[in-house]
Image (cartoon, helix red, strand yellow):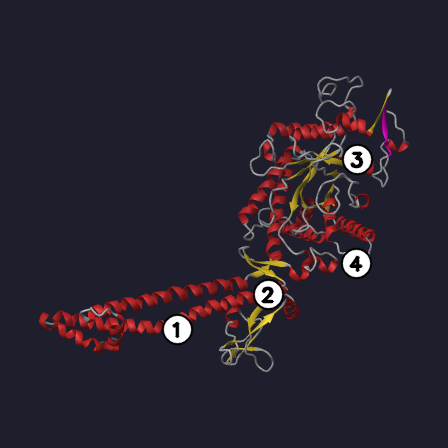
Amino acid sequence: MTYYNAMDRERPYERNTYISDVGAAANPMQHQTEALKARIFEGVNVTEFGFMGKGKGNREQFTPESFGKRERQDMRELLEYNKVTATTHASPGAGPLSGFSNRGFDDGQREDTLNEINKAIHFASEASTGGAIVVHTGEWQRPISESFGKKGFRGYPDEEKRASILLADKRTGEFITDIRKDEILYEPEYETDKNGNWVDINGKVIPRDASVERLFQRVPKWNPDGTDFKVKSVEWPELERRAEEWNKEHPDEKRTPAEMFARIRLENQILQAKGSSLFHAQYYEQHKEKRDAAMKALKIYEQIEKTTDEKEKWRLKQQIDNLYGGVGEIIRRVVPADAKYPTEYLKKMIKEEEDSMRFIHESSASADAQAKQLQEKLKNLATIEDVGITRTTDTIARAAVYAMEQTRKHPEIQEPLFVAPEAYDPKLYGTHPEEIRKIITDSRKQMTKELMGPRYNYSKEKANETAKKHIKATFDIGHINEWRRYFERKPGESLEQLDKRFNKWAVKQAKDLAKDGIIGHIHVSDNFGFSDEHLTPGDGNAPIKEFVEEMKKAGLKKFLVETGSFNPTTALSDTWSFLGSPVYSIHVPGVPHTWTDIRHSYFGRTAKPYYIVGEFGKTISDDYAGGPFWTGMPLE
């Protein structure tokens, strides 16, 4: 083969990138064995298996479990024969690692997600050469401005004033309330002493951090003119002030303005429940006294009626007003006029009083139960991040332990298997570089804790190192580029200046994560900052060249092009060209060809190639002239 440029002979491309460094993921819409062959024909040294299916696979959507032992062996041998490395991508539809659902965090759903990841790990241990098991992070909804507003990001205009915020029960994961920042909240005004402290009905001080039970001994202020209790409105700035004041006094038990909001709302609901219980309970003793008096009178009159001569019983009707306990007047008022004997009136009265007591039992007791339930929610109120992050990191840590065990089971794997969370949708938690850092760091801590436990009994140092080996992030510059749409423009800033500033930010984020050992796997895709279209690198506006350069400096040398629906057979060669390859044509004796000719000849196909590149070309005999794919291949 003749090279037209001296740099074509496996020399560094512009920005120190080699063809061998840049591969492409296998088309996840194809049978993965055929998709792997297609990538080998293109001359890749690096590829990645992918699966679009979840649960039980089908012909349109494969899962890792769609491929049995023989096919997995075929894949492994194809990789080994052609000196290609392959990582694995779990199903993008596996679900949030946290188990996030429309009602809260569902541990059953989280277990299903873990199962999908473990399927990919098991597949990778038998079919791939090891390395990354990519899983998407898209954990729960959160306002962009709430976390990153001060850093120049907004989900939409005035998001910081109108955003919705979720809070959850840290025990169960259930959503407790959905708060809108522009909602006006009302709360009772409480009696205070001269120092502004709350007081109870006896004038004793109730601290701000008192127990829930003690807080409900506060005394609302009575408004005699309106014959009601005084209330006041509470808006978001006031909640921010209260949160700041609380956090200064309680640095180990900080609260957000959203938590302050939710506490007031829950306290109002508890007050209502307790008030309902007290309202009904106040009449309970009256009904009980009447019932008890009527039962005593019934015993007396049952004896009287039993011993009275039948001819004289009519006289008993005249004694209704003189029944025991003064209940005769009540009986006359509430019973039908045709009742004949006092015992009949008394039995009816007893039933009515017991019905009233039963109503109080049910209504008051249920109100007390509701108040107690709300009090428990108030005690366990937490931000959605505090509730969700523990579940996310637990899922990753458990998957990483499984990856560790599968690595041990398969010593033939070239690189240890590791779980590689990848940012996906900026609208969801886990997709900003700072969130990626926290997820990886906390997941490693969780795995370290597990490895130091009785099952493995690792030392802390060994557990830490093992966790770092089996948990690393996947960084896709195209996914991070989607944050461009939320990047706020400064006053007087041109679009060109905005783009330049965003590119600098994105590359710096990647550089910092790589420097700190967070990144272990790299995807390269492109878009215009609106959606994850997986354009061919160079066809969008992601800062890919700068990104690749920084990753190379950080020691990360393998780059996977993530193709989309429209470029599965063209993206790789176009990426090679975009990253600076001076190869503009290849000469086969007597027949000059261009990249386009080569690509249209065999890229993305599974039929025998007309032109061979990469390590695969070295295994084919010089007189290769057609026939079966493996003609000329050595048996060993």
In which image quadrant can residue 338 be found?
bottom left
Indicate the secondary structure of the residue bearing disc 3.
helix
- Look at the numbered discs 4 and 2 and tell me whether their residues touch, using CB distance below 8 Å: no
Vertically, is 404 above or below 292? above
Type of the residue with mark 1:
Gln
Disc 1 or disc 4, which is closer to the eye? Answer: 4
Counting from the top left corner in percent of width and height, residue 613 is at 79, 27
Disc 1 marks which residue? 282
Type of the residue with mark 3:
Asp
Q: CA distance from mark 2 to mark 1?
A: 32 Å
**Crowd tier of the residue under label 3, counting other residues whose Cα lies within 10 Å: few below 14, some 14–19, many 20 or above:** some
- Which badge, 3 or 2, comes first in the chain's sequence? 2
Disc 4 or disc 2, which is closer to the eye? Answer: 4
Q: Is residue 176 left or right of residue 74?
A: left
Disc 2 marks which residue? 261
In which image quadrant can residue 533 be found?
top right
Indicate the secondary structure of the residue bearing disc 2.
helix
Q: CA distance from mark 3 to mark 1?
A: 81 Å
Disc 3 or disc 4, which is closer to the eye? Answer: 4
Q: CA distance from mark 3 to mark 4?
A: 35 Å
Counting from the top left corner in percent of width and height, residue 623 is at 79, 17
Type of the residue with mark 2:
Phe
Q: Is residue 190 left or right of residue 363?
A: right
| Residue nearer the viewer, 1 or 419 | 1
- Which badge, 3 or 1, comes first in the chain's sequence? 1
